[in-house]
Image: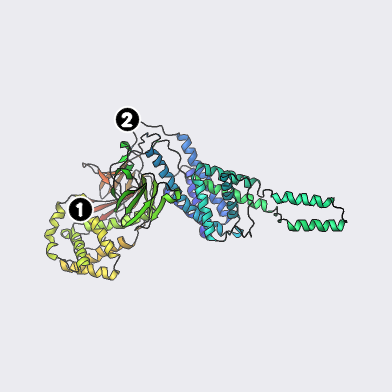
Amino acid sequence: MTYWAELVELYEYRVADTLAGRVPRGGRRALTDLWEVLLAAPLDPALQRRLLESERQYRAHLRRGREESGPPAPLSPASQPTPPGWTAPVLGDTPEARAWEELRQLAWFAVLRARLLHLGQTLQAEPERLTLRVLYAVVENADRDARGVAQELAVPAADDPLTSLRDPDVVRDLMLALADGLFRPEGRTRLRAALATLHEVPFPRHADEDVLTARLQAADREPLAPEAREALREALRAAAPPARDPRERPAIRGAAERLQQTLEALLADAPAPVSGLMPARSILYAAHPEAALPAPDDGAAELVIHLGGGQAARWRGLDLRWHPVGPNWQVQVGGQVALLRPDRPPAERVLTLPMAPFPLRLALSGAYLLLHPEGPPADQLGQLATHARAAARLLDPGGQHANLRLARAAAQMLQGGRVDAATLGPASAEKYRQASPETLLAFARKGVGALVTRLTRLTPQEAEAALHASAGALGLPPQRARALHDVLHAAAFTSERVPGPQPLTHLTLPGDGTFASVTLGDEPVTLAVAGHTLTLRAEHPGVSVLLPGQPPIPMPDLLVLPVPGAHVLLIRQGTWLAAAEVRETGDEDGAAR
């Protein structure tokens, strides 16, 4: 419990920094990640109250900021310039605008369901499961209201066998029903009303109470002796349902108040209506020209596709194909196939494919598909970091591009058991020297991907032996094979820890090869590296890298830029960008530095 108390205190400190106008340590992303961890944590009631109070203050601060800035004025792309981070074509009430808005809601809905399932596990561990019993009554009464049933359900007793709240499957179904109710505004209204009513009257008067009262009054009118009349009254009371202990009311009201705070915190992230406004260049194959994304951005956190406008795409190394099947859509991602049905309820239009290295969430609205990797951004960047180091290793020109030649030899060895050394000698490096940086990086990334796939099928000893044999066939020292094996093994099996982003406009990279992170906003970010500077500029869509005297370079999710004596590694997920400086190893021994 000390561990959770310290994390709650850390969350309170970060919220306090935000309220004071300071950037919280790790940025808002770290604040949100910590909130998600604590929301699912087994906190005692006191810690839970502290957490929810801090979250309430933080959400109120965000709302005040939005109110003070005022709503964004609708921009007409034909007549007014638009900022680089957000261009909003006014589509009006069109299928494309409605689909865009629903996809925002479905993305939030998927996160909401996951959070509520974690919350259900936490509430089930409570003594007496009071909050869970309150929630059970709220969800049931909201459903009765939707069906026009007037009779309300009281909060069930702790030992009520009909609720089965000890059963994890029952709790799971309850939390999913709550998510369904929170998805639509009318459902939220019914749930709020049911919760308010229950807080006011924890025990609705049961119809049997009126029957018992009438029977007791009739017994009083019977011509019986006092002893016989009292015995009759006791028998009538014994046959009636037991009355609830009035001492339960304060505890139920307290649980209802905590539940209300939790639900409001969850709803604070619900997407607001956009009234036909949406980002320009945001949908691949969009029907509206100004909404059309020219090409998928591998560095973007998600991809939206108009399925009716094309048949295939490639994003983040995944080959995507789709075609209509009657009113439905069959989508193929890599080797997996999913059938998506536009006419199904929201929960059935969101599914997750178990892809590597991260699951991929799909959401469908009509003919529009949203793709979103489910791994945390920090983990995704950590994977990119190891791949960037491996790609930089292959791009090191030392030893007549010895590492690139060695990688090709290793691919031959792993595929056919032998190396064609005659075609991979120093003279073969000439084509690498003549290639453009973009072509060479694409070749290196493809090589890293192929070798990583093969290494995952081998033991480390088998992989290292294959690389040593390949180095020997090319006359390269074993140190070079060992160094290349190390970075490939890291890319295949580990994820590097990347620091959280800071909202900076100038960043000097450390010379020790470690990553530093920034959040890309409207202002360009200047990186100082190895005595040179480069500029990163967020655009919509994507990010551009500006080098003095050169045209802008579009930045995908991973970029390796050569500078004298070093490489600059750039990796990106959305607006979170990390950079590192890696020195070239030279020809001496091929050791990593």
Mark toward the viewer: 2 or 1: 2
Q: Nearer the viewer, residue 392 or 344?
A: 344
Q: Tell which residue pokes out farthest to the front in this image.
A: 326
Whole-percent x, y for residue 199 in the image: 63, 47
Residue 351 circle label: none
Q: Is residue 213 visible?
A: yes
Q: Residue flagged by tag 1: what amino acid is it? A: Leu
Q: Is residue 565 visible?
A: no
> Residue at horizontal 25%, vertical 59%?
448
User: In the structure shown, which secondary structural element does the residue marked by tag 1 occupy?
Assistant: helix
Whole-percent x, y for residue 212 in the image: 75, 52
Rendered position, 13 above or below 403: above
Q: Which residue position holds label 2?
A: 78
Task: Specify the quadrant that holds the N terminus.
Answer: bottom right
* Callout 2 crowding tier (Cα within 10 Å): few <14, some 14–19, many ≥20: few
> Residue at horizontal 81%, vertical 57%?
232
Q: Nearer the viewer, residue 274 or 531?
A: 274
Lower position in the chain sequence, tag 2 or tag 1? 2
Left or right of 155 on screen, residue 178: left
Label 2 – label 1 distance at C-alpha: 40 Å
Whole-percent x, y for residue 371 in the image: 36, 49
Q: Tell which residue pokes out farthest to the top in this image.
A: 79
Q: Which residue position holds label 1?
A: 440
Whole-percent x, y for residue 572 in the image: 32, 49
